[in-house]
Structure formats: C-alpha cells, structure tokens
Amino acid sequence: MAERRVIPLSRPEPPNAEPGIAISGLHLSRSGRALLRGVSLTLGHTGITALLGPNGAGKSLLLRAIAGIIPPDAGEINLAPRLAHPALVFQKPVLLRRSARANLAHALKLAGVPRAARPARISDLLEQCDLTALAASPARSLSGGEQQRLAMARALAGDPALLLLDEPTASLDPKATAAIEAITLRAAGRGVKVILVTHDRAQAERLAGDVVFLHKGRAVEHAPAPRFFSTPASAEAQAYLEGRLIL
Amino acid sequence: MSAFREAIAEAAGLIVRADADFLEIVALSAQVTGLAVLIACAIGFPLGALLAVGRFRGRGALSLAVSAAMGLPPVVVGLVLYMLLSRAGPLGVLGLLYTPTAMVIAQVVLVTPIIAALTRQVVEDLDAEYSETLRALRATRAQAMGTLLWEARPALVTAALAGLGRAMAEVGAVMIVGGNIDHLTRVMTTAIALETSRGELALALALGIVLLVASLAINAALMGLRQRIGEPAHG
C-alpha cells in the first residue's frame, strides 16, 4: 500500500493579516476581445491555490498578469512585499542550449546571486529536483519530465516566495507528473505560495488548499478545495466538475 | 594555350617556393580582412541584437538603414571614404588615405551591415522563443540581449562567415582607399586585378588559388566549428 503523505498545504494566516495577493477589477483585452473581465481576488501568503476552468477562461493570462509579464488594461494586482518577485513555470519549458547545470547558473546570475554562492546553490537545486546525475547533460536532450524538473529548479533558483505554475504537468506522463507534484508540495511545505493553473481536476484535489474557478474571464468562485469539490456554489463550476460542456 | 600552361606552372612555382612578394600580399590580405571582420563582428553582433530586441525611437529607420547598407556598392563606399580621408577631406588630418587602416575601415563599412542584419534576424527569431521565459526570469534588456546572442552563436558564426566572404572578395573600395601600393597596401584582390590587366597572369593565378583555398578552408573549418558548438554544451 502506498505511503500516505501529509504535507501542510497552508500555514495559518495571522489574524487581520494583509492579503498575500490582492487583485481588484483586473481587465485585459487583446484584439478587441475581453479576456479578463473584472477579476477580483484575495489570496493568502502561503498554500497552494489552483486556478481551474475551461479552455479560454483566462487562467494562464491571469497567471502572467500576476507574474508581471503582461500588463493589465485596468485594475490592480498588489503583492505583499515577500511575494514581490514571483517565479513562473510554463507548460512547455524553454531551456537554454547548454547543460542543466549551466541553465541553473544562468538563472542564478539573473537573480543576482553572487558567483561564489552559485555552485552550492546549484547542487542544492539539482538535488531538490532529482537532477544531480543529469547536471552535465545538455538541457535540450533531457526527457520532457526531466526538462520540466529543470524548469522547476530554475524557477526556484531565485528562492521565490511565490511560485506560479502554468499547467506544468499537462504534457507529462504520470511518473513525471508525480515528480513535479512532489517538488511543488515540498516548496509549499517550505512556505512558498503556489498558484497552479491546471485542467486536471484530480491534480487540483491532490494539491490545492483553495480553488479559484474562472469562466469567460471572470473569477466565478473562490473556495477552500474540499468545499469547492463537494459543493460548488456556482452553476458553471458545478457543470465543469460534472464534466458537462459549459457554453 | 601554352602561355596559360606556363602561367599555371609559374603560379605553382610561386606558391611552392613561398615567393616573398607573394607571401607579403597574402599576409596583408589576411591581416586587413581578419581585423575588419573582427571589428565588424564587435559592432554588428550587438547592433543586430539591439535592433532585434531594443525598444527605442528610430529603431525602424535604423533597421531599414542597416538592411539597405547590405547592398552598398563598394566603389561608392570607396569614393565616400576617399573624400573623407583625402587631405582636403574632414578626416584628412589623420593621414589614413592609402594605408592598410583605410582599407580596414572600408571593409568594416561594407561588412558590418551584413553581420548586423543577419544577427538581427537570428536574434529576432530566438526572441520569439525565449522572450517570455527571459521576462519570467527577470532578465534586463541587456541581459536578454546577451543571453540571446550566446544562444545564437552557431548562426552568428554563419553571419561572420558571410562577412568574411564579402571582405575577402572586396576589391573596389580597398583599391580606391588603399591605392594598391606595392609593399604597402597591395592585397590579393587588388593585386589580381592589377596583374591581370598587365597580362602578368602567374602572380594573379597564384593569388587566386590562395583565395579559393582560403575560402574553402575557412568554410570547412567553420562548418566543423558550427557542428561542434551547435550541439548543446556539456558541463
């Protein structure tokens, strides 16, 4: 029987604490099409939040807006100071044409880590992501799962307090998915706030402490994961969880 | 036909016995072309990357100017440089006309646009692939440019090679600003033009053979280099 892991998904927030992430009235349009329509959300400093929703709901855009790589047309995203430098992992990692170790060295350089501190940090990251044996391998010759683990290691290089994951396991097999989930859980266990975009309802159930359900560019529902999956409040979330098409 | 056979035999003799005048011309050519391509790479690589990922006023106009400059007629470049460097010109005081330095300048002017335009294209293509990742890694514009240039190194070798080809074959501009002076500014292309016009085919042929062999050798070496550095790096 598989060992059951119990990993704290969130730390209790101090009473009256400022939110970790406060998003208000976020609008984003492209080519005249509204893709995010007044998203307002408040998320904690820690724990794993899943962004769920059908294709085109605006999950990835919202994640990129939080990462600061897509400026919104209107609205505000306020990150608590400790979450001010988020790291982002994409579904399809784009790695540099150099070794796994050199990819991490490059990320550490960009993060401003002093040269002398890099070798130890690289060893630590490689170990965290089970890549030590592949350190000298060309990054682009690694398997899909190994590449994504390297992308996770690279994202963690700057020691971020906010980790944004855009469907990191969408193209991976179950074993590689389990490895990415384990890295995610370990990061969350260390107090890193994780926001995970996923299509995989079961993954959200496995990992998330709370769920934001997006539909047509709106945050339709935000609830603790157990409540969301047992008794979704919105008709859209209910339909999505029942596997019905939401039009 | 016998005159041609004699010229070929004489040319082979010049090469085999490493004739001093012949070697001097080859050495000066290598020096001028090598230095010009190095300078053109030093300017063209960052300029191309800047045009690819930089966001500044006049970027479009500069990009257009660089592309247009790829087709600059060498004799026109030679003429303009002659006017600038001649004693009556604004840079006449430098005394560069009819010196190897003037020839290097002419080749840099001709080669830099080629290297910059090819670099811009390569870096633009890579930027489409890497930009989101580099922004997520919080790379500054300068850091992104540096990263993209390093990632583009196999293609940059090709750009440098294209520049080298142009510089090696260049005759019009270097003839005008160098003057084709014996033992001072005579390089392979200008010597071939002069010797052929005088009917002295042996030296022209010998230099032509060197040009062809050099071109082949450089292409072969760079092809091997590209294959090596084109593979993902280890370690």
Image (cartoon, coloured by chain):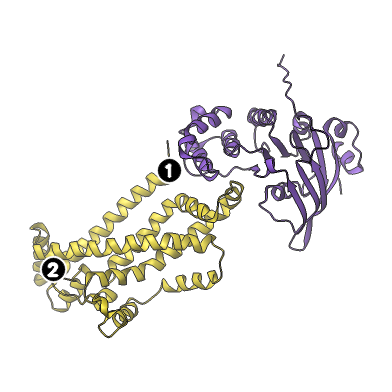
Q: Going 46% across and 62% down the picture, which residue do you hit?
A: B48
Q: Could you tell me the amino acid type at mark 2?
A: Leu
| Residue A216 seen in render | no
Task: Please name whichever residue, A39 or B15, is drawn nearer the observer in this view of the structure.
Answer: A39
Residue B231 tag number: 1
In the displayed structure image, the side of residue A83 where residue A246 appears, left or right: right
Query: Which secondary structure lies at badge 2?
Result: helix
Instruction: Report x, y in % for residue A83.
Output: 69, 41
Q: Could you tell me the amino acid type at mark 1?
A: Glu
Task: Kindly identify which chain the residue marked by label 1 belongs to.
Answer: B
Q: Residues within 10 Å of mark 2 (few under 14, many from 20)?
A: many
Q: Chain A appears in which tint?
A: purple
Query: Which secondary structure lies at badge 1?
Result: loop
Q: Is residue A47 above or below residue A95?
A: above
Q: Residues within 10 Å of mark 1 (few under 14, many from 20)?
A: some
Q: Is residue B111 above or below residue A135?
A: below
Q: Is residue A229 above or below residue B10?
A: above
Residue B203 tag number: 2
Mark 2 to mark 1 CA distance (whole Å)? 42 Å
Task: Kindly identify which chain the residue marked by label 2 belongs to.
Answer: B
Instruction: Report x, y in % for residue A217.
Output: 81, 51
Instruction: Report x, y in % for residue A6.
Output: 74, 21
Q: Quadrant of the N terminus of chain A?
A: top right
Question: Given contact means CB atoms under 8 Å apart, are the residues at marks 2 and 1 in contact?
Answer: no
Instruction: Report x, y in % for residue A15.
Output: 83, 34
